Amino acid sequence: MNSELTSLIESGIPGLVFASSHEGRRSTTSIGNRSSLDLASPLLMTNETSFDLGSLTKIIITTSALMDLVHEKKISLEDKISKYISQWNISEKSEITIRELLQHRGGLWEWRPLYISLQDPSEVVDYIARLPLRYPVNQNRHYSDLGFITLGNVVARILGTGLESLEFAHTKFGAPDDKSDVAATSRGDRLEREMVGSHAPYPVPEKVEDFNQWRTHVLSGEVNDGNSFHLMGSVSGHAGLFSTAEDLLDFGERIERHPQFEIFTRSGADADAHLGFRSWVDTFEGCADRFYGHTGFPGTVLGISSRHKAVATLLTNRLHVEGAPRPTEELWRPILRSFHQSLHR
């Protein structure tokens, strides 16, 4: 395992933390730097370093809350979003369900820089409701931040509190619990600005010049996601959490025991995508195990194996580079393979 982790650093990843749990036995390894851009001396990564989780927020906050609400019979997966958000009671969105948004099959846009068009977080719900669908409902899976922003609003309305009420231990919205030990991400909003300017990977109509608050400093202890940071006070159902490896292992062990875990991780129309969770299959010595979890744009991943009672998390600061960052999936696959093999030793 150490050789695979070292190879990531040698390939240009500034730093990482890998942590795992197997039948309650834990191990954590930190390598490289948590921050180096614009610094005379790099700051070393530690086992306790906090990371901007990006889209891991989707399962840690939104999906897990929906699992609780389903188990408590306060909602049904077949409930229509319009039952909780009246603005969705329009023809093309009125029948879309919680299940379809969890499966990313609601037909919504994958991403839009909402902060360019809006100034107040109270406008977000109505804006997404009025935004025309990009795809036919339930035709194909189209991973959507807007769907999970909406689900986060559903959760908050049912609970009657902000999503901050779901924080735990060192897992907090908006800023790390320990600001002195945090992994830096990108140089400002560089990557989202490029997305808007190039219309890739999504052909958004918003323009770079219509926004004058682009960040240019190295982000350290600030949420990287633009919609979460610029518009929603860094609290959203799709992004905004900071956490540590230890907290993620706690979460993975806890959620695997949840009464709804088996239901939320069943395969449906999309083999590697479930209700909020995604998955990876790795085969070793005849054991084809499926690891359930999610990735986060800043370079974070969590994988959970029910078969082996094991959890693994890879936390990197892959965005903390001047050039194009390596894809998170590319970083995770060899680590997952090595971890799975270690479970058989």
Image (cartoon, rainbow, N blue to C red):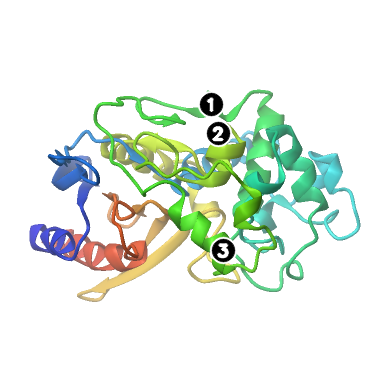
| Numbered disc 3: secondary structure | helix
Disc 1 secondary structure class: helix
Instruction: Check residue 218 in the rendering and tell me which mark sits there, or answer none.
Output: none
Q: Amino acid at mark 3?
A: Gly
Q: Is residue 276 in view from this perspective? A: yes
Callout 1 amino acid: Glu
Q: Between tags 1 and 3, which lies in front?
A: 3
Q: Residue at x 65, y 36 (%)?
A: 155
Which is more N-terminal, label 2 or label 3? 3
Residue in the foreground of this view, choosing between 122 and 141: 122
- In x, y percent, where is residue 45? 17, 41
* Residue located at (24% from left, 36% from top): 49
Q: Nearer the viewer, mark 1 or mark 2?
A: 2
Circles 1 and 2, Cβ within 8 Å, touching? The answer is yes
Say left or right for 209 vs 31: right
Label 2 environment density (alpha carbons within 10 Å; few <14, some 14–19, many ≥20): many
- Residue wearing tag 3: 197
Question: Which of pointers 1 and 2 lies earlier in the amino acid sequence?
Answer: 1
Question: What residue sits 53% from the left and 34% below the top?
Answer: 234
Disc 1 to disc 2, how far (Cα)? 7 Å
Instruction: Name the residue furthest right.
Output: 91
> In percent of the image, x 75 and y 41: which residue is there?
125
Count residues near mark 1 (Cα–Cα under 10 Å), then give few for <14, some for 14-19, many for 20+. some
- Res 235 label: 2
Residue 73 visible in the snapshot:
no
- 3D distance between C-alphas at marks 3 and 2: 26 Å
Callout 2 secondary element: loop
Looking at the rendered structure, the kind of residue marked 2 is Val
Q: Closer to the N terminus: mark 1 or mark 3?
A: 1
Q: Is residue 106 above or below residue 232?
A: below
Occupied quadrant, residue 51: top left
Please give the residue where the numbered disc 1 appears in the rendered image: 164
